[in-house]
Image: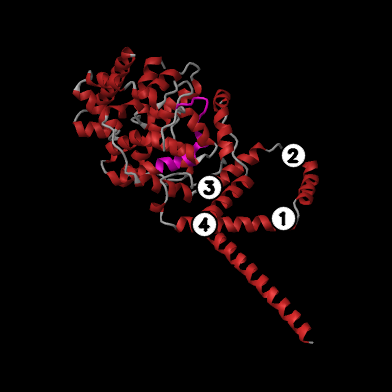
Amino acid sequence: MAESNQTDAEIMLKVAGYDSKALEQLYDRYSPILYTLIKKIVDDSETAEEILSDVFVIVWRQIDQFDFKVNNVYTWLVTLTRNKAMDVMNRKAGKLLPDYDDHYEKELILPKLSPEIQALELKDVMDKKDNLNKALSSLTDAQKYVLELSYYGGMDLTEIANKMNIPSVTVKSKLQVAFGNLMQKVSEAK
Amino acid sequence: MDKKKIVDLIKLEVLRCLSEKDNESLQSLKVEEIEFPWKELGDYQNLIALLPLSLELDHPSNELKNKTAMKLYDIRDQIKAKIDARKAQELPEVPAAELSLSVESVEVIEPAEQIEVEEKVLVEVEEGVQFISDEPLAAKEQSFGFVSDFKGKDESETLSHHTNDEISAKQPPKPVTEKEMIEKVVKDFIKTHMEREHESLRSNINKNKILSIVLFVISLLLIVALFIIK
């Protein structure tokens, strides 16, 4: 399908009217970034593709849960995708989790974005790529490592602490400092 | 709790790293704290979502689009139920006293015969759906279009013209009616799968017409011949 000039929010509005062509546009636009994220988390193409298609099924089924007041398509989709991929990985790893049903999906897979979040679109986000890379490169290796274990590895404080052989309190503080520094550097680069 | 401490909890929340105890206190702060830093929460949610940008972009296989389309097609009943529920919500509430009256009036408008016809159409749609889903997907164009083309072209265009206004109003569009949806699916089904049969039927009818005319002319000739012989 040809690239359209519509904004993500415009496409999302059409998806909310169950326009399957709009969903296809959303897929064409977002599948590379979402697939990249999932693949980083699961490290397996087949599972990554399975999760990606499930994400679009969730979007189609739960579109009425998207907050059109906030209208943040990018963060909603990325967060949803990460949550779904983490859930699949945790279940595969045998973690004890509640049954996957509609209620679970609404509570733990669908993002709960802040009502005061700034709206982001993929096109605008792509322009921030260099700034983000610069900000990331300013972090120490340890800070980058804890962020990575947490975001892509889905590890909690104790798991990271065990892996790094340091106390949980130290992990907590490292994460908070790393994330704070990242925010500061990205903001400075604007 | 001071703002810095709340923001520290927010950082862990967006990473999903909060302990159960901290999570409980943060959730209660969201409800109780009048000056909860919602903007900071939003900023950190956006920041964490930027992280995948640092990865080298990869692409899923082309076949995945078809697989996704199939999955979407399989949940068409759920979507239909959602559309129905949304429609029901949009209907104005009818006072109890008027309820029996309005039911009667609906019965008058919709005779049993019409209901039967609608049921038949639904059955045909279901049969069509089965047939479509049995077809090999590889032969089809990679598209979500066949999943549930609930919207006609005109409606889509109108919607796109009004999109900006609607976004400013921040309201999702109303779904198409069930009747329109059924008509569209039936038309698509007939167009895709019945055209050849229609053509062969049409040519058979034409042949039969010619044959009957010829037979009619022969019979006429025989009658005339018999009359002359007599």
Residue A64 within the magenta-colored segment of the rendering? yes
Mark 4 touching mark 3, by CB under 8 A?
no
Residue positioned 51% across, 53% down in the render: B192
Q: Amino acid at mark 3?
A: Gln
Q: CA distance from mark 3 to mark 1?
A: 26 Å
Mark 3 touching mark 2, by CB under 8 A?
no
Mark sitting earlier along the chain (3/1)? 3
Tell me where the magenta segment starts and ends, as one range: A54-72
Q: Which mark is residue B94?
A: 2
| Mark 4 on the same chain as mark 1 | yes
* Residue B135: x %, y % from top left: 44, 57
Mark sitting earlier along the chain (3/2)? 3
In the displayed structure, does residue B31 sit left or right of residue A136? Answer: right
* Residue B113: x %, y % from top left: 73, 58
Q: Please rate how many residues cluster around mark 1, counting C-alpha atoms within 10 Å: few if below 14, some from 14 to 19, many from 20.
A: few
* Residue B172: x %, y % from top left: 56, 32
| Element on which disc 3 rests | helix
- Residue under numbered circle 1: B114
- Residue under numbered circle 4: B193
Viewer-side label of 3, 1? 1
The N terminus of chain B sits in image quarter: top left
